[in-house]
Image: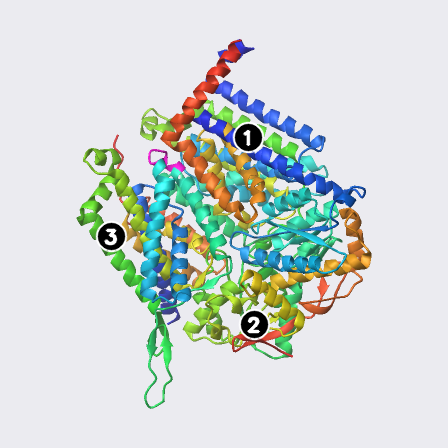
Amino acid sequence: MTMKLKKLSKTSRRNYLTYALVILAFVLLQILSGTGSISSSLKGMLVPICAYVVMAISLNLTVGVLGELSLGHAGFMSMGAFTGTAAAIALQNVIPIAPLRLAVAMAIGAAFAALAGFLIGIPVLRLKGDYLAIVTLAFGEIIKSIFNNLYVGMDSEGLHFSLLSDNTNLLDGGKLIIGGPMGIGGIQKISTFAAGFILVMLTLMIVFNLVNSRAGRAIMAVRDNRIAAESIGVNITKYKMMAFVTSAALAGAAGSLFAMNYSTIVANKFDFNTSILVLVFVVLGGLGNMLGSIVAAAALTILPEALRQFSDYRMLVYAIVLILVMLATNNPTLRSYLDRAKAAVTGKGRKKEAV
Amino acid sequence: MKKKLISLMLAFAMALSLAACGSDSGSTSAPADSGDTADKSATDAAVFKLGGTGPLTGGAAIYGTAAKNGAQIAVDEINASDSTIKFELKYEDDTHDAEKAVNAYNALKDWGMQISLGSVTSKPCEATSAETYADRIFALTPSASSTATTEGKDNMFQMCFMDPNQGSASAQYIADKALGTKIAIIWKNDDVYSKGIHDTFVEKAAELNLAVVSDTTFADGNDTDFSVQLADAQTNGADLVFLPMYYQPASLIFAQANSMGYAPTWFGVDGMDGILTMEGFDSSLAEGVMLLTPFNADATDEKTAAFVAEYQNRFGEVPNQFAADAYDCVYAYKQALEAAGATPDMSAEELCDLMIEQFTSMTFDGLTGAGMTWDASGAVSKSPKGMVIENGGYVGLD
Amino acid sequence: MTFLNFLISGISLGSIYAIIALGYTMVYGIAKMLNFAHGDVIMVGAYICFFAISRFSLPPLVGILLAMLLCTVLGIVVERLAYKPLRSAPSLAVLITAIGVSYFLQNAALLLWSSSPKVFPNFFTVTQSPAPDGTAEQTVRTGIELFGGQLKISFVTIVTIATCIIIMLALTWFTGRTKMGKAMRACSEDKGAAQLMGINVDATISMTFAIGSGLAAIAGVLLCSAYPTLVPTTGSMPGIKAFTAAVFGGIGSIPGALLGGLLLGLIEILAKAYISTQLSDAVVFAVLIVVLLVKPAGLLGKQVREKV
């Protein structure tokens, strides 16, 4: 077994480790919640953690692998949340089986987010650096603004759309699905931890396969040196777009999952602060490091809840922890100290493995 | 290598925080059990565990903090009295966000909450009310006023008016008193509360033949400059401007209208209450503002005066309607629990059934109204008082 | 006349964005860092000035100077504790730390000064003495009126625009003419080369933060004089808008920040007036996107040619 593992490349070993840890965490949490030994607090966070993990991995694809800073990732989540949830409500009678409906809704959410990603990608990917970042922020705000003013209703004649004010004029028995600033209410909570787990695994598979493919290497070549990549014939726009749209689609699926874990959802939830939050997961977990993103997303989602005992000082402590962790992981002095500590630990670890 | 290290560190951090979660639930699960099972409770001090969520941090912190403080005063008063009903109150922060509200609610459940004060703001309360409904925990929200909060939930009750009631009551009041002929509305386009009142107001206004000549909005992020909205109202000749919003943006609107030289009749809703308590606010700007509110901190009745004095003494501020609603919630619970003969060893589910029975049948007198009753939908019936601001204080309109 | 009034509202809103954007662009241009905590330093500055004036009844000018002083100190402390240890770290790490600092300042303000809004005093007023014959009462004027009162420009707007221009000129002079300013530009071009030339890069960057925070205090006072409610989150949205304005004008460019801020304010007001109050934010951002597509480095930004 050890031999076989060693034959694999370092990256694939890492990838298998990531899969294994995710599966392990899932099994462990399932057993724990089966025996009733985890708090309702943690139990209630399992689905959002899955959604944030998928958000972090997908943003890592844009920021870490493609190397472009995006400040509007929540916009795609919003797109997926609204279209996916609206689809789930519209299909309530067509597909009575909840898990199947959830899957269809997530697929629809992902498709719409991918479409948005494609449309936004056309202008965005022509820009560079901070200008690209600000345009993604702008698109995120535009998406928020649109969903805050969009009304979608359904009656026997099908779907009705209107912008700015409710002109859907539904027939009797019709139902307003998206109510502008009211968002979507009365959502059936069909998201489950198992669904979240499957989505995380799917996301990992998609991202790892993309990164380790010819396309993935092209994407990273664009990141590392755009001009060199271009000069050897890499189609920059195509590969940038590939990464960006994949990232958007995954965020859309995460949005659908997230939305259907709550009975209500509003456009303001997916604002600039949420985009930033996901960016924090990515940077904290390490650029290009998917396992890091998973751990960071989970840890930072749990952290504010774990700090509830500080009551009024909770968010203050959260801010301090965030700053300290950033300092600890990025400061050269501290890092060299930690490196040495880690070398000592891993040295022991290797010996054990050899035995 | 470095990345590995970072993830290692993070894994450690998470293990720590998970452990913290674990120990949290460990320490609180004991009292939780005592609430659920009758036999253990004798060892515990017999108190009802009362929990609520509200924004204690972030942009909406003022509302959550006020509700928390108001409820705390009521709980302390009751616990100090010789009443047989005693409470333990816990408020958790939900940052005015549905996701965080559910998290906060779950934390309260771990703590062993038996009866709930719901959530302070509307959208979070919609999310937590779905949870309280599923878990069969009775909830009485001080201030979440949207219809969706109570819709379809038999154990969710409100202490405040529902938004639609406020909208139609305001329109009715304006029509009855002939306060204005041409009406402008400025409302907050990304806020459930504002939207709910706006919609029913417009509907009712059409019914009563009130002309709405200007209908403009603002939202988070562009809630500082109101020159366009005010100019629109002014050029359309509006003589009354209806402001279904909280007092913070309203104070900016008054200041800007004043500098424009525009002086229509202003008509607000219960969120306007509190405007006179803003530190540094020039109350002459709000002179003549009318509002429908159930609570008036300047009222001279004994109960209100005592509450306001106590609140100022402890928190250094004049209480607003959120604080008063939360205060009333606690006393309403006390009355209902006493009438039902409930004891703290009852489970949340048993209490839930008792409370539904009590609240739909009892009459309650509080700071925010006398003779309040609730219907089965959870909506309260109390009459809003018309107030007008004169010389920096409220004066009741007949 | 309505159009002119909207124009003036737009300029007054834009001048506020501009003054915040100047601080943003200054720090970005030199430290190459998006300081997301800038908006919160603004909030702190406004609170300090508020307390100085209304609690300790100090004269407004003293309040402003005190706010500038304390914000400068705050800027230096934050820089020393949170940003300096990350000097060699990737810029994203510093960005996240800045976000941490922003959360910290907001929540510290919440705990220190509570969530209830404070109303900032408007001290940009002129008191007109009552006419001796008793025909006119004593009035407090907040602005000048043109065309028989149809057009009003508040003193705050005039002061803000004047301050913007003064700051812009001062910064241009400072970075272009003084030794410290030249050192700053050198650091912004190439830190390594600057260090080799004997410039103390660390000290230069600290200086940038100190100046940026001092400017934030002025911006805070002017923001709250124009739109007088003060809560712990006061700085965050204007901060983001000003950041947008800075990019709009070409981030790093000092005149660009002024231009970007003014245009952003104008577009916002005109979009509200002539398109829709509901979609004004969407319109603002759409215009931003179009401008960046035509001029990818902002209106006045330098288009850096890549060397191959």
The image quadrant that residue A228 belongs to is top left
Question: In the figure, is residue A165 to the left or right of C166?
Answer: right
Q: Which mark is residue A302?
A: none
User: Residue at 59% across / 57% down in the picture?
Assistant: B192
Tell me the residue that label 2 is attached to.
Answer: B267
Q: Give above or below for A217 relative to C137.
A: above
Q: Give the magenta part as a residue range.
A: C86-93
Q: Amino acid at mark 3?
A: Leu
Question: In the figure, is residue B133 to the left or right of B253?
Answer: right
Tell me the residue that label 1 is attached to.
Answer: A203
Looking at the picture, tell me which residue is in the foreground, C131 or B92: B92
Mark 3: which secondary structure? helix
Q: Disc 2: which chain? A: B
Q: Is residue C90 magenta?
A: yes
Looking at the picture, tell me which residue is in the foreground, B38 or C79: B38
> Which x, y percent locates residue B239?
52, 76
> Which x, y percent locates residue B386?
62, 74
> What separation in Å lies between label 2 and label 1 (alpha carbons)?
53 Å
> Which x, y percent locates residue A334?
39, 30
Looking at the picture, tell me which residue is in the foreground, B382 or B177: B382
Q: Amino acid at mark 1?
A: Thr
